[in-house]
Amino acid sequence: MTLVPNPQTTTARSAQRSTYRAFGLTLESDIPLPELTTIEPSGSPDIQIVYGRDMPLPTREQGVVAQFRRDGTHFLAWPDVAAFQFHGPALIEVQPYPDTPVTYLPFPLLGPIMALALHMRKLVTLHASAIDINGHGIIFVGDKLAGKSTTAAAFLRAGHRLLTDDLLAIQSDPAGALHILPAYGQIKLAEDAADAVKLSSATPLPLVYPTFEKRQHRLTKDFQHDWVAPKCLYILDRVGERPGLSPLTGTQALTSILRYSYISRFGKVALSPADEARHMQKCAELARQVRVATLHVPHALNRLEETVELVRADCEEGA
């Protein structure tokens, strides 16, 4: 696929650089990321996000571009949004299209771009929501519309705290113990789910895109800022009238974790043989250290409290 430079983007946009904390890292960004916790600059950041210039922008007809390179200079671009050039895991250049609102840019930056940056730092990343129950990390994965965010919101209403919504990062320490690194205090909910859960500590935000089905809700509290160890991982399955659990072990547990790993969304082209082996090993370690089960979630939103009680009891049983 041939990319063409955009003559209208020969100079970087003016920017006020800010410093943030998320996923256990310090981020210094030209692009405003209001979702994240702002901190005072101190030392060198772990990741710099800067405006680029003269980067090639694909046309709408060319579609999404993803070029993964062994030297870590990956290039990804979404037509009518922006192009992203990696210079290893610590520097990301961003070239928006001329008419792209700056408010659109956090959507890819804090999703697939951050997932790739975290993977390059040898973290396990899952497409998941997670909450903290009494110092234990509880992870929810599942297909689109399975109810990950809605289920997590039900736990917030019950008095627990959010660790992440959409992108989950897990780090292992030198002793092999696993830690969930908190992301930021925001959760996406469809209007019917938001009406059913009624989070008193959340502020609904304007839709990122007018056609989006879900709205971001910023938490004024109920966010866990410190890492916690993962304890349970549930694969959500919307079926039946009552919540239920089906434990998974061995190959079944590992296969489920691999299926919902964020890096798998890019396909095998994003993984070198060494990366693939490391990724498999880390996912296998996660499968060994946590309880894995299919969580059958009823379609009816008025049964969410029963799901919360079932998960609480399962976590206590595995203590």
Image: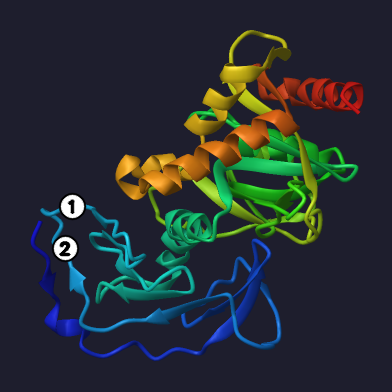
Residue 144 in sight from this viewpoint: no
Residue 79 is left or right of residue 93, and the answer is left
Please identify the quarter of the rendering in which residue 133 is found: top right
Determine whether 256 is above or below 208 in the image. above
Percent of width and height locating residue 7: 12, 83
Crowd tier of the residue under label 1, counting other residues whose Cα lies within 10 Å: few below 14, some 14–19, many 20 or above: few
Residue beneath the point at 42% across and 67% down: 105
Amino acid found under the numbered disc labelled 1: Gly
In primary-sequence order, the first of circles 2 and 1 is: 2
- The residue that label 2 is drawn on is 58
Q: Position of residue 302 (x, y in %)?
A: 73, 23
- Residue at point 62%, 39% (across, down): 149
Query: Which numbered marker is on residue 79?
Result: none
For marks 2 and 1, give the CA distance: 7 Å
Q: Is residue 291 left or right of residue 46?
A: right
Foreground pick, 72 / 157: 72
Packing grade of label 2 (10 A; few <14, some 14-19, many >=20) is many
Q: Does residue 33 lie above or below 229 as drawn?
A: below
Residue drawn at 73 percent across, 55 percent down:
174
What kind of residue is marked 2?
Pro
Is residue 284 at least partly visible in the picture? Answer: yes
Measured from the top left, where is residue 49 in percent x and y?
Answer: 46, 77
Residue corresponding to mark 1: 63
Asked if labels 1 and 2 touch by Cβ distance under 8 angstroms, the answer is yes
Residue 71, x across and y down, in percent: 33, 65
Q: Is residue 31 above or below residue 89?
A: below
> Considering depth in this image, is 128 or 280 the residue closer to the camera?
280
Question: As drawn, is 214 to the left or to the right of 306?
Answer: left
| Residue at (37, 73) in percent of width and height | 87
Quadrant in which the N terminus appears:
bottom left
